[in-house]
Image: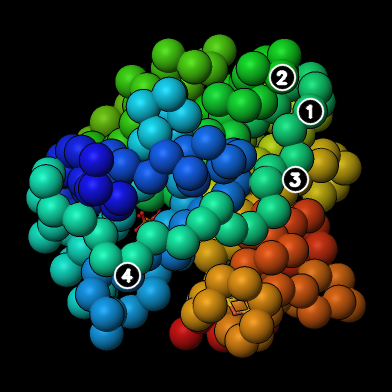
Amino acid sequence: MTQNLILSAVFIAPEIKRFNIHAPLIAKKCKPGQFVIIRKSATGERIPMTIVDSDAEEGSITLIVQGVGKSTREINQLETGDTIRDLVGPLGTPSEIEHFGNVVVIGGGVGTAVSFPQAKALKEAGNTVTAIIGARTKSLVILEEEMRQIVDEVLVCTDDGSYCSEGFVTGQLQELLASNHKIDYVLAVGPLPMMQAVAEITRPFGIKTVASLNSIMVDGTGMCGGCRVLIGEEMKFACVEGPEFDAHQVNFEVLMNRNQ
Ligand code: NAD
Ligand code: FES
């Protein structure tokens, strides 16, 4: 079978497409939290994409692409049977998966896709996993059913109240804490202001909290410095030392400025 062949390409929400791609070597090696860099054409932009799922037997990986700019919209024009010009990976440091106890995995918008493999692995490691999924509106809620099949509890909220609870994911987290739900570990993936807000909520409780950082990446292998982030006093490269970092140590202001 052709390398990088798109086995299926389906829109799961407006501008959000799920791709199942033939990539046997990556499927065999990848671990939760790792990503690939894809390029649609020889002159195309290099786009980092978290590996949402993989099937080593079938030799396939799943990517979920949100069409937010020119390059991602072009990628989302690809259909079943097309091939992706370049696909490099797996890249990045795998997530820390261990038995923490009660775990809360928070996915904001398309960040839900990024949090999916960690939720699955954390459940398989014996944790009790609560997933919080947030989206601006009902049509943008993704992977709810898939998440329900792998974790203990799923809480869904929309900013406009068009589906399930009204409000941000942080409201759901605060409600859990207010109900004395014991939390040992939190993973947050989504927009930077969301991950920053999650970190500020868990900080006073001393709950270990990890954020997956979507810094700008070019080579993805530690060469260009494009993805540098300030963690405590130290400069780190998100592509090789991340993308996951202790959320209480991340300097979100510096990262937001760089991403702008
Ligand atoms: P969005 O702006 O629609 O927000 C999704 C949800 O996050 C909201 O519904 C809300 O629940 C929560 N949220 C947003 N702002 C918040 C705030 N200030 N405080 C508390 N909660 C807040 O998200 P989107 O358009 O789907 O975009 C997803 C974002 O995730 C993008 O910014 C993208 O860059 C980022 N992302 C991150 C990674 C990663 O690895 N960290 C990967 C993919 C995408
Ligand atoms: Fe170039 Fe990380 S993307 S160093």
Residue 94 percent across, percent down from the top left: 68, 46
Report the amino acid beneath label 4.
Answer: Arg
Mark 1–mark 2 distance (CA, rounded to whole Å) = 6 Å
Residue behind mark 1: 98
195 relative to 231, above or below: above
Mark 1–mark 4 distance (CA, rounded to whole Å) = 33 Å
The residue located at (72%, 14%) in the rendering is: 126
Residue 39: numbered disc: 4
Coloration of the structure image: rainbow
Q: Earlier in the sequence, mark 1 or mark 3?
A: 1
Report the amino acid beneath label 1.
Answer: Glu
| Residue closest to the eye, 252 or 68 | 68
Residue 62 visible in the picture: no
Q: Is mark 3 within 8 Å of ligand 1?
A: no
Q: Are marks 1 and 2 in contact (CB under 8 Å)?
A: yes
Residue behind mark 2: 125
Report the amino acid beneath label 2.
Answer: Ala
User: Closer to the observer: label 1 or label 3?
Assistant: 1
Q: Secondary structure at mark 4?
A: strand
Q: Secondary structure at mark 3?
A: strand
User: Closer to the observer: label 4 or label 2?
Assistant: 4
Report the amino acid beneath label 3.
Answer: Thr
Q: Secondary structure at mark 2?
A: loop
Q: Are marks 4 and 2 in contact (CB under 8 Å)?
A: no
Mark 1–mark 3 distance (CA, rounded to whole Å) = 14 Å
User: Closer to the observer: label 2 or label 3?
Assistant: 2
Mark 4–mark 3 distance (CA, rounded to whole Å) = 32 Å
Instruction: Please state if 165 lies on the left or on the right of 137 as rendered.
Output: right
Mark 4–mark 2 distance (CA, rounded to whole Å) = 34 Å
51 relative to 88, above or below: above
Q: Residues within 10 Å of mark 1 (few under 14, many from 20)?
A: few
Residue behind mark 3: 209
